[in-house]
Amino acid sequence: MNPDPNDARPRDAGEGSVPPKGVDRRRALGIIAGGVTAGVQALGACTPLSTATEEDREVKVLAWQEYIKGNYRTMTEEERAATIARLERLAKVKRGEKVTMRSTGAQPGVVFGYAFNISKCKGFRNCIHACINENNLDRKAATQYIRIFEMEDGVIDLGDGDATYEHEVPAEGHFYMGTQCFQCADPPCVKVCPVGATWQEPDGITVIDYDWCIGCRYCMAACPYWARRFNWSAPEVPAAEVNPNQHYLSNRARKKGVVEKCTFCLHRSRQGRLPACVEACPTGARVFGNLLDPDSEIRWVLENKRIFRLKEDLNTEPRFWYFTD
């Protein structure tokens, strides 16, 4: 299969390179944590800021407080509420965006799963455009979480598929397969992260703390499904196109030098809504739901259709199945 277009740029010793050994982010934060108060005071007293506007000073103090915070998993509910309030305020004063951010946790008795009906997909790519808009993906780099591969009938190897077709669809003698993060039950990407920036939530969704990611890209190398994207530059989304309905672990603003990925739109799914790609599909090729609910559509598909998963031999147990009518 062709390399991920989102990771195809030249790699140098600057952007995204593996950090030198010595003091990593955890240790560095531990060293400076005791000086938080002094640091904030210093920010307010230093010469460059003394001549800055009140708004500029607020941005720098908020940004400093965000930088020295801990990993999302170790935060108390009060600390999570505080960081969300800071991020909402930063979006307002720094970018002029009014966003509503949540930290909704996984609901008990829920494990999300996904199924893709190859018979119904016609290659329209409505899902891709919906995902881009919903998840505030970088417009300049044309970042995509979802790819639709056009495959010749009788071929099942994605390496022989074309995800860049520009002709009218569906094409005769072809079928279509979509890929994205498969939310593995045993995700190899989690195991290789050196700083614990990515983990699996109780509802089966693997997430990333974007503020804890150090950009080493080990997770990208470990993922067998090419599901992760690295930001070589700061993502750009026109202010008028920003989706203000956000979640700390999902579609909030990301930055240069970190990895991101599909989260099954957990800012929607944890509110009882379908992921944007499912809702946008005009042919009903996408099925999403709670694997623990015996009456859910996803369970019916798994129990009544002939299904398969990609690279099952790797034992990652992806919670993403393919089936046909």
Image: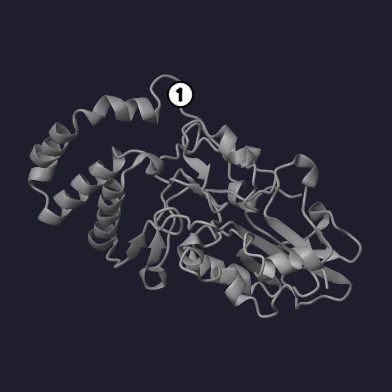
With respect to residue 203, does 44 lie above or below? above
Q: Position of residue 88 (x, y in %)?
A: 28, 59
Q: Which sits in the foreground, 158 or 81? A: 81
Residue most extreme to the bottom: 282
Q: Residue at x 65, y 42 (%)?
A: 186
The reply, left or right, for residue 269 in relation to residue 148 is left
Looking at the rendered structure, the number of numbered marks drawn on it comes to 1
Q: Position of residue 40 (x, y in %)?
A: 15, 38
Q: Position of residue 320 (x, y in %)?
A: 69, 57
The reply, left or right, for residue 167 in relation to residue 193 is right
Find disc 1 in the rendering and name its residue: 20
With respect to residue 87, does 176 lie above or below? below
Q: Residue at x 43, y 60 (%)?
A: 236
Q: Secondary structure at mark 1?
A: loop
Q: Which sits in the foreground, 293 or 3? A: 293
Whether residue 149 appears in this view of the structure is no
